[in-house]
Image (tube, rainbow, N blue to C red):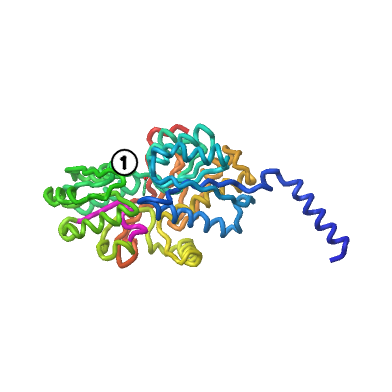
């Protein structure tokens, strides 16, 4: 290169830098508030891996901005949630928050995001209020509402002819909302939930309640457990001798990301969820290959939700030239987008929750195999959302 061409190249680069808006030259601060400890630790890890995979696929940039990560372990503890989210908002002054898994923690995050007008992308927690009364243009969910898998499973259990069901879950928002969704779907077909059993979160002391289920002799059991609690529940249900006599159904978290640890005790279980291991669409095939290559692991539903959180952020940033302060333009772009997800393409509802198919899955070997669609294009009612 001659001195003249070298000078011209440098001069053009300098001019381009001057022309670019100031924000484009600084990294975008992304606050990851996820559980790194406790019963949901593996879920937080998969979400982070999925999110980072999409960013890597985009050459480390979204909307032209390089990404700088700030991390907080929320421990799935609602009592620490406001302090934890303020570490990201006030101390680190992040541009966007991505989190979290636990509904109770996510509710505190949503309140803080509304007050500070910080962008919040929720990659798991299904609390109904977040896309209900707390809905906001700056809050988007890439996952599901607790109502969705519960309602879909309820309809499917009704169609299978079961009439008398017992439910068992953790006593906190996600479990209770999941069971309520189940009842709404199930009782339409004339069935009855005869007893709701509750365990404090995150306890895994199930024995007394399993004895009660045996005595009640229902046609079937519906449950919401996830992560470490789901592993223990499925093992205990089988060890108590109930698996052979009383069919166990669940929101699909019961068997997602858990099959290695559950082994044979999970085999045959039927659940409903917005993802399955055998979807076979082109996007899912590419995603599963890339995830396995990057992490030497098979992805699960949480990895998909993290990946899609990054896709949603990328769509909003592209429309705003990398400026997350343009909240209205960001929201308008994600509202009209079709997200090309490994679960299948989806759009967001008016309250910013995915409108999506709920798959019926059955555990075969180490897979949640898709055996049908429990509910097509299921829209969360978004009760109480005014936006
Ligand atoms: C929740 O708290 O919303 C939740 C946690 C784990 C799996 C699904 C939902």
Residue 351 showing in the rendered view? yes
Q: Is residue 121 above or below residue 278?
A: above
Q: Nearer the viewer, residue 12 or 83?
A: 83
Q: Is residue 364 above or below residue 141?
A: below
Q: Can you tell which quarter of the image residue 90 is in?
A: top right
In the image, farthest residue toward the left: 215
In x, y percent, where is residue 360? 31, 56
Q: Nearer the viewer, residue 266 or 89?
A: 89
Q: Is residue 252 magenta?
A: yes
Residue bearing the label numbered 1: 172
| Horizontal relation, residue 190 to residue 77: left or right | left
User: What is the magenta range?
Assistant: 247-258
Beta carbon of the mark 1 residue lies under 8 A of ligand 1: yes
Q: Is residue 344 above or below residue 166?
A: below
Q: How many marks?
A: 1
Q: Nearer the viewer, residue 209 or 4?
A: 209
Q: Can you tell which quarter of the image residue 230 is in?
A: bottom left
In x, y percent, where is residue 113? 50, 36
């Amino acid at each position: 290169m001659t001195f003249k061409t070298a000078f011209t190249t440098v001069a053009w680069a300098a001019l381009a830098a001057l022309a670019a808006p100031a924000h484009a030259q600084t990294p975008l601060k992304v606050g990851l508030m996820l559980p790194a400890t406790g019963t949901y630790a593996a879920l937080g890890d998969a979400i982070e891996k999925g999110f980072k995979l999409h960013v890597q696929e985009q050459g480390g940039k979204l909307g032209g901005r390089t990404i700088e990560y700030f991390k907080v372990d929320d421990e799935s503890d609602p009592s620490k949630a406001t302090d934890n989210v303020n570490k990201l908002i006030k101390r680190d002054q992040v541009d966007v928050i991505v989190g979290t898994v636990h509904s109770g923690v996510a509710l505190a995050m949503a309140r803080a995001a509304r007050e500070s007008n910080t962008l919040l992308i929720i990659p798991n927690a299904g609390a109904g209020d977040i896309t209900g009364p707390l809905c906001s243009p700056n809050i988007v969910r890439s996952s599901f509402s607790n109502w969705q898998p519960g309602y879909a499973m309820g309809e499917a259990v009704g169609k299978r002819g079961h009439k008398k069901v017992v439910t068992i879950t953790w006593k906190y928002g996600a479990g209770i909302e999941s069971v309520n969704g189940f009842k709404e779907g199930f009782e339409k077909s004339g069935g009855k939930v005869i007893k709701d059993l509750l365990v404090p979160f995150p306890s895994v002391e199930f024995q007394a309640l399993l004895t009660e289920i045996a005595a009640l002799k229902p046609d079937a059991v519906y449950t919401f457990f996830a992560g470490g609690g789901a592993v223990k529940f499925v093992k205990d249900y089988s060890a108590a001798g109930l698996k052979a006599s009383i069919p166990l159904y669940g929101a699909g978290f019961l068997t997602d990301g858990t099959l290695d640890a559950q082994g044979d005790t999970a085999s045959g279980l039927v659940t409903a969820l917005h993802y399955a291991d055998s979807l076979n669409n082109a996007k899912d095939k590419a995603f599963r290959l890339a995830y396995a290559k990057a992490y030497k692991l098979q992805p699960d539903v949480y990895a998909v939700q993290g990946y899609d959180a990054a896709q949603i952020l990328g769509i909003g940033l592209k429309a705003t030239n990398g400026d997350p302060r343009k909240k209205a333009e960001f929201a308008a772009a994600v509202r009209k987008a079709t997200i090309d997800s490994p679960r299948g393409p989806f759009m967001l509802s008016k309250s910013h929750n995915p409108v999506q198919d709920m798959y019926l899955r059955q555990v075969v070997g180490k897979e949640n195999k898709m055996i049908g669609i429990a509910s097509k294009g299921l829209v969360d009612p978004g009760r109480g959302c005014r936006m």
